[in-house]
Amino acid sequence: MTDATMTHAQTPDGSLPRRALSRRVLPYAMLSPAVIVTLAIVFLPMVQTAWMSLHDYVLFRPNDFDWVGLENFRRALGDEVFWISLGHTVIWMATTIPAQLLLGLATAMLLNQPFPWRPVARALIIIPWALPSVVIALMWVWIYDSNYGVANEFLLRLGLIRQAVPWLADPDTALAAIILTLTWQGFPFFAVMILAGLQSIPKSYYEAAAIDGASAWRQFWHITLPGISGVMMTAVLLRLIWVANSFDVIFVMTGGGPGYATYTLPLYAFVKARTNLDFGYGSAIAVLFTLLLMGVVVVYLRRAGKAVQ
Amino acid sequence: MKLARIGAASALALAAGLAQADSTVHFWYHFDNADNPMDALVEEFEAANPGITVEAENVPWNSYYDQLYTAIIGGNAPDAAMVKMFAQPRLVEMGALEPIDEQLAAWEGTDGLQDNLLELTKAADGSHYYLPVQYVVLYLYYRADMFEELGLEVPQTCEDFRAAAKALTRDTDGDGQTDVYGFGFRGAKGGHDHWASFTLARDGVSLTDGLSSEAGTAGTQFVADLFREDKVFPPSAPNDGFQEIIGAFKAGKTAMTIHHIGSANGMAEALGDKVSAAPVPECGGGRWTSFGDESTAVLSSASDKEAAWKWIAFLSSAGNNARFNEATGQLPVVKSDSESWSLHPQRFVEATVDSLPFAHLLPNSSATADFVNTVWPTAMQRVLTGDITAAEMNEEITALFDD
């Protein structure tokens, strides 16, 4: 390969172009393993999904793979469950991420204060984030259990409720209960990222502000927030994508039920494809959701990017 | 160059290995029981059939069919697998199953199977693909002690059932909270059996015919009223699955539930003589209970179909079938194994046998899988939570089977 390229690029003065060529080729050569792997395991399935979404493809009729154009998309837009799921996805993202961010910010501020055993507290805070989602989901199913769960026991003893509440079986509380679970799972990520951001703010800024008589609130607003805004923006972006796509916790806790009360779009796509084996329609929902999410991410990057600058 | 030589050598070694091992049967099954006897059965089979290796894989039940269908399409299907009737139409449609009519005709074990089982497991096209391996029939579990305490009779009709369930729903310790609920209803996946006993029993109602009639709607409405009006199910009922209904019954949180003999020993262990069993009540002029089937099948992609058949026939042979069922807690399909069966207390075996005359399978239709997996659970939960009406639920199911 190298020999062939060399003969091809041969010039009267051989050495200079050869060095220039290798300099040009080297970055691509070094990048190619990562690019090839990404193409194979991310890009190819994506293209395949898009291709499937244009076909009527039900897995238990493997020989029928009929081109239907945009029919699956048209069906999705007229599907009541699609809109229910979309509504839940919006609620899901619009509450989980701010809740995680605020809780993470408060935790990071606390962990940034000197107090005894601080390293231990910093290590412990990671636990919810480090646990597998399935474990978290099962744990919270027990917490919410209407017969034996500690959540009901606790609230009953405090006198806040008079009857045990079936948190996950009641359509009015099921989604909120899962959002609380996911908030608990995800806030350590924000806490750790923001803590790292906080530690990079020079102490001298605060000292100077204190000398000028700035209150704690003004110090937070004018020094801390701008200092961690870059980190926060990245963390929110990552969480936005992860939370939007995550359905494992919902799947284990309620499977989308009761009824459609906790259906989100990724879950609906999964159920359609994996349980109903309707890969054509499932793919169409997945593609629609990807487009919607891309829109959100682009808007977010534009606005947040400006704000940070 | 060197690499090529190593490659060639490994290919040769692999080929030699294959030639020596003759054939391997990849077998998929699902067992809830932790002390799984499969290894002992495999060992015995391999000793009796030198040259055949069995690789048995326990696949979790919740995703068993998702995985099976995906494996078939992906070309990684097992050679033989445990299968239920509701999956048969789809598997046949996929061309994934191997007919076993010839093998059944030649096999000495065929006559030893319980009467009618092969008839029940026959496919719509008239061929046999399934070899029965175990069966159960669903019946009503009830707390004999609570019935006695309240002077109640075992319910014979839906009306009796409703009255009993109301009486059994009580606050036993006077703290204003209901401690015992009349019936543990399974509102999550798998609960269609409960609903069916109250709905499909009615005259002229089946999944494929008459479900949207007045009688059919009355059945679903009956279930909805039990939950929403009478409040005789635990409030968690819409999400409750197998674990929850059995757990709640064992813990004394519910006084009745519907399940099969597979949970009898666990219940007897937890509650002793306080638990008893009876056929499900008669509703709207008939009785309906679910026949829980389980068979094994050879897949059409099997590399050595003869070996795969030998293995599944081994599991349904006298003696082996009893040991298989001791682990699953279900009932053997071999007559001689049934006669010597002593694993379950008599009252549960009786309830099973008494329920046989009105035990039914779900329709032999491709829509059944969707009914079981998504349409029924979602629609039932929506009815229980007041999101849709009983008539809307029945219409949704009718539309599914009409398609």
Image: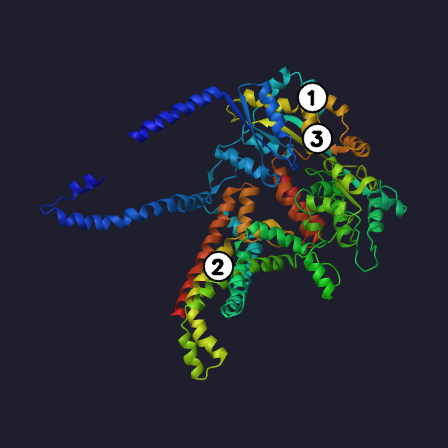
Q: Secondary structure at mark 1?
A: loop
Q: Which percent across, then down, holds residue A158?
A: 72, 66
Indicate the secondary structure of the residue bearing disc 3: helix
Decide if residue B391 is in sight here. yes
Disc 1 to disc 3, C-alpha distance? 13 Å
Is residue B124 visible from the viewing direction of this image? no
- Which of the two discs, 2 and 1, sits closer to the camera? 1
* Residue corresponding to mark 3: B326
Please name the residue that numbered disc 1 is placed on: B318
**Going by the image, does A277 lie left or right of A155?**
left
Q: Residue furthest front?
A: A116
Count of picture labels: 3
Residue type at the position of mark 2: Leu
Q: Residue at x 73, y 38 (%)?
A: B263
Per the image, label 2 sits on a secondary structure element best described as helix
Left or right: B27, with B118 as reference point: left
| Image location (x, y in percent) of residue B371 | 64, 41
The numbered disc on residue A240 is: 2
User: Which quarter of the image is occupied by the C terminus of chain B?
Assistant: top right
Q: Amino acid at mark 1?
A: Ala
Q: Chain of mark 2?
A: A
